[in-house]
Amino acid sequence: MTMDLLLDQVRGIVQYYPVILKGLGVTLALSFIGIVAGTTIGFLLGIGRASSNKWLAFVVGAYTDIFRGTPVLVQVFVVFFILPEIGVELDAFTAGAIALTNIAACFISEIVASGIRAVPVGQIEAAASAGLTRLQQLWLVVLPQATRMIVPSLVGQFVLLVKDSSVVSAIGLLDLTRSGWVIVQNIPNGLLVFSVVGVGYFLICYPLLHLSRRMEKP
Amino acid sequence: MLLNLNFRVIGETLPDFWLGFVSTLSMSLTAFAGAVAIGIVACAMSIQPSRFVRAPAVAYVDVIRATPLLAQLYFLYFGLPNFGVLMPEIMVGIVALSINSGAYVSEIIRSGILSIPRGQVEASASSGMNYWQQMRLVILPQALRPMVSPLIGQAIVLVKDSSLLSLISVLELTRAGQTLANNRFMPVEGLATTAVGYLIIYFGLKLMAAAWDRINPSSARQGRP
């Protein structure tokens, strides 16, 4: 490949910057929604999963297993193609946000449950004998300690979520990956185009990975 | 609608799903073997004292972990032809999966090796063992056990990730579901059967990991969830 052609292609990609920025925006928006909503729902599910009520724990475990055991791509397809069959029409962004939030919640629930189980029983007994109600025990004693333990795993899960968001490009949503896909149709240099896409993800994910790794070290 | 699955159509297309199922399994198995090979090399490089040997392995692991598999897949799929490398889609897919999972396998092996107490290494060194003897006789026999569960976990991730290969038109389980959805306008039947296929593999591997942890209780403690 000649140098001139390569320079032309670089210039071509630079001209596509609005597409790349729009894709980056969609990726960031989806990731943000998934992280906030997924963490909230994940905590609720996780509390249910670690509950002493065996039946509740089983139902939550079975629900999360179904989503932890199937590919994100299949889940995105299910939300986008099957919900309309039962009368729920969704645009691609909403469908992607729902699928990502759900799968994030399923993985986070398992992390939260393992954090709750790691809180020593003595803590709960002490809280109970101090006269705290069940809800107060959970809110004031168990969750603060569990959360502190699971923060590194949570951040690691956020990285997975940002990366999983690339799958929504399969239903035509213009995210960062899809922007690369669009550009490569006109500038046939996949290495160059997807290096740019990769840099975009790296800038989001690497700081999070670094943070998670630093917190894991005591 | 959801409770009204057309089982006749699912029955008719079951041979297609079986082909997809076998394809997903065999591609995942091949890619996993590749990932373990890459992971061993990357890990061996990342624990060397020399900076120049370590840096490429660390960069590889970081870049792979900080970018999505789909972008890596497209990078190879659209990028390799630039170098005149023309491979069938399925090969591109297996290579992408191997390179992607290799980074995670490398981290799993690394944390297994680093979990061996420093004293063990020092003791074997002072009893006159060289580097390979230490690795073969002291470190690896202890480090392998706790690696098994996380490796099965990575195999689960790999099987699910292989669904992305349907986007570069490789015939596998997800593609089989899409074909049924598109050809007969039955997305529910197609995707449900696909999901069941993945769940069979998922629960199979999960049971394997649980059985391993039962036989080796110590590995459950060190294994990642």
Image: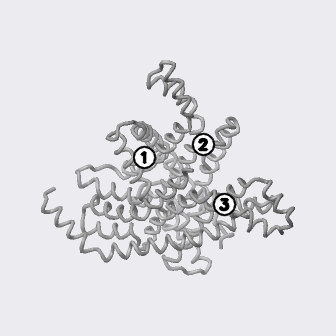
Q: Is residue A101 left or right of residue A139?
A: left
Q: Are marks 2 and 3 in contact (CB under 8 Å)?
A: no
| Disc 3 element | helix
Q: Is residue A206 left or right of residue A125?
A: left
Q: Where is B222 relative to B124, above or below?
A: below
Question: Which quarter of the picture shows residue B112?
Answer: top right
Looking at the rendered structure, whether the residues under marks 2 and 3 are on a common chain is answered as no
Return the mark for residue B98: 1
Out of B100 and B63, give the one closest to the viewer. Answer: B63
Of the image marks 1 and 2, the number of the one nearer the N terminus: 1
Can residue A12 be seen from the camera position used here?
Answer: yes
Identify the subunit bearing mark 2: B
Residue occupying the point 47% across, 61% down? A208
What residue type is disc 1 on? Answer: Ser
Return the mark for residue A112: 3
What residue type is disc 3 on? Answer: Val
Report the mark closest to the observer, 1 or 2. Answer: 2
Identify the subunit bearing mark 3: A
Question: Which quarter of the picture shows residue B77?
Answer: bottom left
Spatial distance from mark 3 to mark 1, Cα to Cα?
31 Å
Point out residue B179 in the picture as x, y percentages from the top left corner. 48, 63
Q: Residues within 10 Å of mark 3 (few under 14, many from 20)?
A: many
Q: Residues within 10 Å of mark 2 (few under 14, many from 20)?
A: many
Spatial distance from mark 2 to mark 3, Cα to Cα?
20 Å
What residue type is disc 2 on? Answer: Ser
Point out residue B24 in the picture as x, y percentages from the top left corner. 50, 50
The residue indicated by pointer 2 is B149
Q: Where is B186 relative to A191, above or below?
A: below
